[in-house]
Each structure stands twice: as structure tokens, then as C-alpha cells.
């Protein structure tokens, strides 16, 4: 998109230039001061509207708001104060939404933990952000117990204290003071160093993401979304849960994605919107009677997190021709969407990830930090009020990732003269499996701790169902190390999608260039051949 058109955004009706964190952004003029204030507005305006559905349980906005106050009182009584971090380890469901609302009500900061996390991962997160409390499901008791840095204040949502607070009428702590630059959540994202970084999501950023989704899809308060991506990841939290609570719509929670269950639930609940990763759409296409499901209420089929194969888009659109197939692109650091495909254009522009959101900006930069001409490839630098101000207590990582008010995504892409963005390549080493990002450095760091491992390198290979598979090349003592031992070691310490699908024990040193750096291009070729042989 040409620069003059971008600068004109500051003068669009409904927008104005504002300074936040010493950066100038176009921002919505009409917006709530914070997410709690918006939840209060919705509960007051639509008290009997259904906020959340899980199975046969339906929770109205009035009940959600009342329970948020009661649970906030429980947290406050335990010692949680405004600004404290509260970790949450829960599956998709009403309890997760209750916990989010309660944390907002007490004025604390949500630390969302993926349900696939192991004790070692939770331990690192807790040691880094020092949460005052953790809310978890009973199935995660051992994970919490195994994390040495987990806070002593723990709430099992199946326990008597939590259930009593859910049922207790009335009580709530004093209303917290929240500014729009206050932290709403900390989401941990791995990096090339292998150490997870806590992206600091703000109320300002989350509100703008909600408004971007609203405007891009013309969403209203009658919308019903199926939450089948993990709520604790940015796509679930800021692409589904918060936007629909913000709108006053309905969240239909699916605890675990199973394609037939998802389709049946979408039909029964008259879903109007779904955000899924491409692998989920591919799985749905395996249902032989897919076209028989009554999904006539469904109008927005959004997807992101990984490249969507163009044949998948075409086949899904053929089964449900009224559906708007809409690609979206974003990251944890951008509080979800950076680009969204306008409804009705997804099949015609299947190679694009859409246009930049209303208050966002993308610059395509070369390695010297200079903007390239339209249509040329370069690194995507992203700016806007939805971009995080930095990483929790990590000024070095913040300085490395930001320049001139822009977050450097590491993704290579281009923007054509009409403003449509395309991705040419991802960060060189990152693997995306079923929509989940896997950073090889993190897996390699775990592998290095296994006795008998001399060196290790992790790459990805194509996987027909989940996009990519993780492949580990391990140089070790051949007689003392087996692939199953390597996988078991990783399974105890990493989320399951990070565990290598293939482990190759190497008899000699891994290939390196003259500078001593492992030549992963050669390993990728070997991994690709391995994948072809397995198919």
C-alpha cells in the first residue's frame, strides 16, 4: 500500500492520532476505557443474553458478571491485588471464561497457560512473571504440583472454595482502577533463543483487536461463535473469546476439537462465525457427509495460524457456497489480527492473507531497514495500537524485536499496489504444526539435557494432515540412545505438538559450514525425503 494512503488513516472519520509508549498510532475515537468497563456495559444492556454455552449449560451475561464479582472477591481474599498476575490452566469451557472475567474484575493480569504445557514449561513461566495465584482444572493438578515456582495460592475449579464462590450471590471487591495502557494479559511465546518471552497484551491493544474484528466482518451482538481453538493462545483469546464478549455475542465452547463434534455443535447452536486453523478445516473435509450438516447460519469461516492450502479453501467453499472464507494473519505480539481478508474475497485471493486492519500499518523492509517497493519481498514490520509495548521484564528482547515503533515479525512477504499482503516465507527455522508454532531452539535445548546427546538439530518436514512434523537429528552414543528414549524425554518436558515425530540418531557430527553453524538446509532435505518415503 502506498505511503500517502497509509498516512491518510489518521484523518479517517472515527480515528485520530494518539501517542502510546512513545509511538504514534491511529486509534478509534469511540472506545471503552478498558475491557472490564465494556463487560459492565454489556451486562447492563443485555443481562439475559447468553454469554457462554458449554454442553447443556448456558450462562447469561448477568450471571457471568455476578460470578466474576464473587470469584474476584475470592481472589482478593486470598491476597490477589490489582496488577498482580494470575495464571490460568484450564481447557476450553465456561470455567475459563469465568476465570478471565474474575481476573478482569479484580484488576489483575491474566497469564494464560496452554493445556499442553508440562511442569517444566509452567515452572519457567511462573518463575518469570511470579503470579500471585493459579487457577487450574483438576486434570492439571500434577502439572501444577510439579512446577516448583507455581504460586502457593491455588484454585482448583472443581474444589469447594471455587464452586461456592460461583454460587455465592453478591459479594465483589472494590472496583479496580484500570487504564487503557494497563496490562490485560501476558502470553508466552517462544523465540529463536529457545527461552519463552512474555508478550504484554494491554487493554488498549485488546480493545482495538475487538474493534478490528467487528469492523472487518460487520459483527453484531447476535453473533454466535464456536470456540474450538485453544482459548489460552492469542487466536482463541483475542480472536474469539474477547471479541465476542466485547460484542455481547455468544461463545459456544468446544473443550476438545473433534471434527464431527464441531460440525454437529455448529449446526445445533446455529453458529455464525468460526475461527479455526487450516488443519481443522482439512479434517472437517474428511467427513463423508459434510454437505449434509445444516450450517446455513454460518457466514464467516476465518482461518489463520498457518498457510491454508488453496484446494482446501476451494473444497470448503464448494460444500458451503454461502460461507465467506477469510484468511487472517497476526501474532501474539500483535494481539491477534494484523491483516484480515474482506468477506467475499477469500476464494478469489486465496494466495493472500488479506489487507491490514484499520488502525494497523505494515511496512515491508529490507535487511538494511529500508522500505521496498510495492510487490517486492522483505520482512514485515508491524505497527498499530494493538501491538504489544514489549516483553515482560525483558528489555533486551524488546529492543531486539522493535525498531522505530514497529515490531519486526521475521516473516517475509510483500504488499501489492492494492494493499493485499502475501507471505513468501516464514521465519527460517520456525515449524507450524496444526496451527501451533514450534521453535527448534526450544526443542534443541531440551534435547541437550538428555544423557548421551552430543548435539542436536530440529527441522520441519511436510505433513499432509497437520502441515508440518517435527524432525530431530541427534548425534549421540549409538548403543546408549534410541529414538523412543529421545521422544519420551521430550514428552515429559514439552507440549505434545513439540515432541519430534521422527528422531534420527546420527553416527557422526551434524553438517556444519565453515563458520561452524549447522547446515539446516541439508537436514531439511533429508527430512523431506523421509516424509516422502513415509507417504
Image (tube, rainbow, N blue to C red):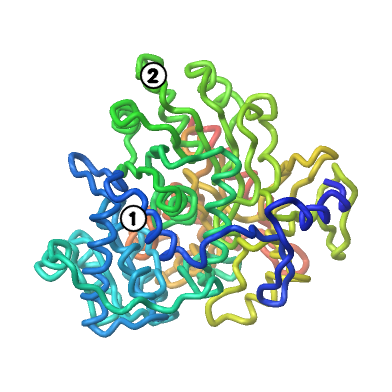
Figure label count: 2
In front here: 446 or 225? 225
Q: Which residue is depicted at the point 60% across and 63% down? A: 509
What kind of element bears circle 1? helix
Q: Which residue is depicted at the point 37% across and 16% down? A: 288
In front here: 511 or 27? 27
Q: Badge 2 local density, few (<14 within 10 Å), some, or many (20+)? A: some
Across and down, in percent, residue 246 comes to 44, 53
Across and down, in percent, residue 18 comes to 71, 68
Q: Residue furthest front?
A: 45
Give residue 10's quadrant in the image: bottom right
Estimate the spatial distance between the alpha carbons at disc 1 and disc 2, rounded to whole Å: 37 Å
Does residue 216 appear in this view?
yes
Q: Which residue is depicted at the point 34% across and 40% down? A: 257
Q: Which residue is mark 2?
A: 290
Across and down, in percent, residue 474 comes to 51, 60
Using residue 132 as the reference point, say whether residue 191 is left or right of it. Answer: right
Q: Badge 1 local density, few (<14 within 10 Å), some, or many (20+)? A: many
Q: Mark number for residue 522?
A: none
Using residue 388 as the reference point, say whether residue 348 is left or right of it. Answer: right
Give residue 481's quadrant in the image: bottom left
Q: Which residue is depicted at the point 54% across and 67% down? A: 455
Residue 208 versus residue 420 in the image, above or below: below
Using residue 82 as the reference point, say whether residue 166 is left or right of it. Answer: left
Using residue 398 as the reference point, say whether residue 469 is left or right of it. Answer: left
Q: Mark number for residue 43?
A: 1
Amino acid at each position: 500500500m502506498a505511503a500517502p494512503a497509509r498516512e491518510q488513516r489518521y484523518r479517517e472519520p472515527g480515528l485520530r492520532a494518539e501517542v502510546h509508549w512513545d509511538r504514534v498510532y491511529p486509534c478509534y475515537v469511540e472506545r471503552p476505557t478498558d475491557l472490564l468497563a465494556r463487560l459492565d456495559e454489556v451486562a447492563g444492556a443485555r443481562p439475559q443474553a447468553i454469554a457462554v454455552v458449554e454442553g447443556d449449560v448456558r450462562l447469561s451475561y448477568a450471571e457471568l458478571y455476578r460470578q466474576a464479582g464473587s470469584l474476584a472477591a475470592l481472589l482478593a481474599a486470598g491476597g490477589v491485588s490489582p496488577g498482580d498476575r494470575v495464571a490460568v490452566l484450564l481447557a476450553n469451557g465456561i470455567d475459563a471464561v469465568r476465570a478471565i472475567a474474575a481476573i478482569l474484575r479484580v484488576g489483575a493480569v491474566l497469564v494464560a497457560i496452554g493445556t499442553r504445557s508440562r511442569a517444566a514449561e509452567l515452572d519457567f513461566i511462573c518463575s518469570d512473571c511470579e503470579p500471585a495465584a493459579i487457577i487450574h482444572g483438576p486434570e492439571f493438578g500434577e502439572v501444577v504440583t510439579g512446577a516448583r515456582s507455581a504460586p502457593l495460592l491455588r484454585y482448583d475449579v472443581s474444589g469447594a472454595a471455587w464452586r461456592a464462590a460461583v454460587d455465592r450471590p453478591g459479594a465483589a471487591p472494590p472496583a479496580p482502577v484500570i487504564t487503557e495502557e494497563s496490562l490485560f494479559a501476558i502470553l508466552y511465546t517462544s523465540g529463536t533463543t529457545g527461552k519463552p518471552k512474555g508478550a504484554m497484551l494491554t487493554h488498549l491493544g485488546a480493545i482495538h483487536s475487538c474493534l478490528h474484528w467487528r469492523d472487518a466482518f460487520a459483527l453484531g451482538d447476535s453473533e454466535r461463535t464456536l470456540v474450538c481453538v485453544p482459548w489460552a493462545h492469542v487466536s482463541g483469546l483475542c480472536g474469539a473469546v474477547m471479541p465476542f464478549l466485547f460484542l455481547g455475542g455468544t461463545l459456544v465452547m468446544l473443550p476438545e476439537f473433534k471434527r464431527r463434534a464441531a460440525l454437529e455443535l455448529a449446526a445445533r447452536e446455529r453458529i455464525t462465525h468460526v475461527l479455526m486453523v487450516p488443519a481443522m478445516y482439512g479434517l472437517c473435509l474428511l467427513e463423508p457427509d459434510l454437505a449434509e450438516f445444516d450450517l446455513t447460519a454460518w457466514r464467516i469461516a476465518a482461518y489463520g495460524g498457518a498457510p491454508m492450502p488453496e484446494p482446501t479453501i476451494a473444497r470448503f467453499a464448494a460444500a458451503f457456497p454461502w460461507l465467506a472464507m477469510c484468511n487472517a494473519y497476526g501474532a501474539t505480539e500483535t494481539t491477534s489480527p494484523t491483516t484480515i481478508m474482506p468477506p467475499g474475497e477469500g476464494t478469489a485471493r486465496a494466495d493472500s492473507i488479506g489487507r491490514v486492519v484499520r488502525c494497523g500499518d505494515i511496512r515491508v523492509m529490507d535487511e538494511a531497514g529500508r522500505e521496498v517497493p510495492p510487490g517486492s519481498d522483505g520482512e514485515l514490520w508491524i505497527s498499530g495500537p494493538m501491538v504489544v509495548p514489549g516483553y515482560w521484564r525483558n528489555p533486551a528482547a524488546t529492543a531486539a524485536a522493535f525498531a522505530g515503533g514497529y515490531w519486526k515479525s521475521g516473516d517475509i512477504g510483500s504488499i501489492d499496489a492494492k494493499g493485499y499482503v502475501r507471505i513468501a516465507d516464514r521465519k527460517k527455522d520456525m515449524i507450524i504444526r496444526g496451527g501451533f508454532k514450534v521453535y527448534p531452539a526450544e526443542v534443541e535445548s531440551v534435547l541437550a539435557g538428555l544423557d548421551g546427546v552430543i548435539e542436536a538439530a530440529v527441522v520441519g518436514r511436510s505433513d499432509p494432515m497437520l502441515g508440518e512434523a517435527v524432525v530431530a537429528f541427534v548425534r549421540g552414543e549409538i548403543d546408549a540412545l534410541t529414538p523412543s528414549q529421545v521422544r519420551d524425554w521430550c514428552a515429559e518436558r514439552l507440549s505434545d505438538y513439540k515432541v519430534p515425530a521422527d528422531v534420527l540418531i546420527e553416527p557422526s557430527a551434524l553438517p556444519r559450514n565453515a563458520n561452524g553453524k549447522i547446515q539446516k538446509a541439508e537436514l531439511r532435505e533429508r527430512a523431506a525425503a523421509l516424509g516422502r518415503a513415509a507417504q
